[in-house]
Image: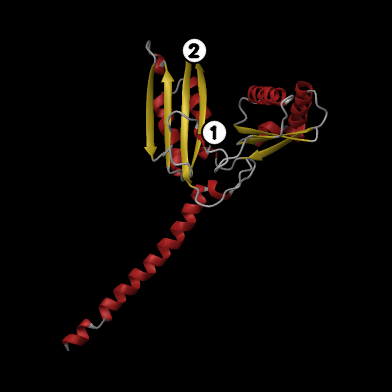
Amino acid sequence: MGQKANPIGNRLGIIRGWDSNWYGSKKDFATKLIEDNKIRTYLNARINKGGIAKIVIERTLGKLIVTIHTSKPGIIIGKGGNEVDRIKEELKKLTGKDDVQINILEIRRPELDANIVGDTIARQIENRINYKRAIKMAIASTLRMGAEGIKVKVSGRLGGAEIARTEEIKQGRVPLHTLRMDIDYASVYSLTVYGKIGIKVWICKGEVLGKRELNPNFVGGKSDVSDRRERRDERGSGDRRDDRRGGGDRRNSGGRGDRRN
């Protein structure tokens, strides 16, 4: 089951929220769904080098709010905010709505986002870098930022081979069946001169034990794995060192010598 279902869709309502927040009746549900797909397809093609992780769409009383999560906000904003205004006008023409708002949220740790990691690997493969080297570099940087595990699967004509094949590289733990595990997933492709190469990325960020904010625009909390580990290491290491020093002092001046006397 864990290998067949999408890890994000499998955790919706448990530790993940929906990327589209609106209510649709039977009459206009399909129209809004198709419009969401058009917006995401257009923005991903329009800002193909903007490091987009996800696009959250909200609708309230005729107002369309598009929130772009990106690791390169400067590219999307542009000089003096001109690029954002241009994108806003283009979205108004695409959707036919007058009230369109664009928010931009910066991702502080792009190494912990599956979409950005997969896109980085895809761009490197397109630049003729060896796929194994690109994957190992991405895995090393992700684990360095505090992830518990990562799995990358590539398939296609790897290295320009005549016969397509699939290879998988994994480090750490990625338990797909455990619903309380925060696992990010992305499926991207690299367009090379010898065909498309599919890339799938799974990143395990840790365990979510308490109640979690399901708003997809929520930044912080359990997703900051490295911060939690640093705080835990600081608390644990200092106390243990003090205890060891105290134990050594007691052994040197302790009661064994007194008993012998």
Q: Distance between the residues labelled 1 and 2?
A: 33 Å
Where residue 233 sits: x, y (%)?
44, 57
Give me the disc on residue 9.
1
Q: Residue furthest bottom?
A: 261
Q: Residue furthest left?
A: 260
Q: What residue type is labelled 2?
A: Val
Quadrant where the C terminus is found in the figure: bottom left
Image vertical order of residue 208 relative to residue 155, above or below:
below
Where residue 136 sits: x, y (%)?
40, 32
Q: Which residue is pictured at 54% across the width and 46% down the height?
A: 223
Q: Which residue is pictured at 42% across the width and 27% down the height?
A: 153
Q: Earlier in the sequence, mark 1 or mark 2?
A: 1
Q: Which residue is pictured at 38% across the width and 31% down the height?
A: 169
Q: Pick the residue in front: 252 or 152.
A: 152
Q: Which amino acid does label 1 sit on?
A: Gly
Q: Which residue is pictured at 57% across the width and 48% down the height?
A: 212
Q: Is residue 68 left or right of residue 201?
A: right
Where residue 211 sits: x, y (%)?
56, 51
Give me the disc on residue 246.
none
Q: Is residue 107 left or right of residue 180?
A: right
Give me the disc on residue 193.
2
Are the residues at dot 1 and dot 2 in contact (C-beta closer than 8 Å)?
Answer: no
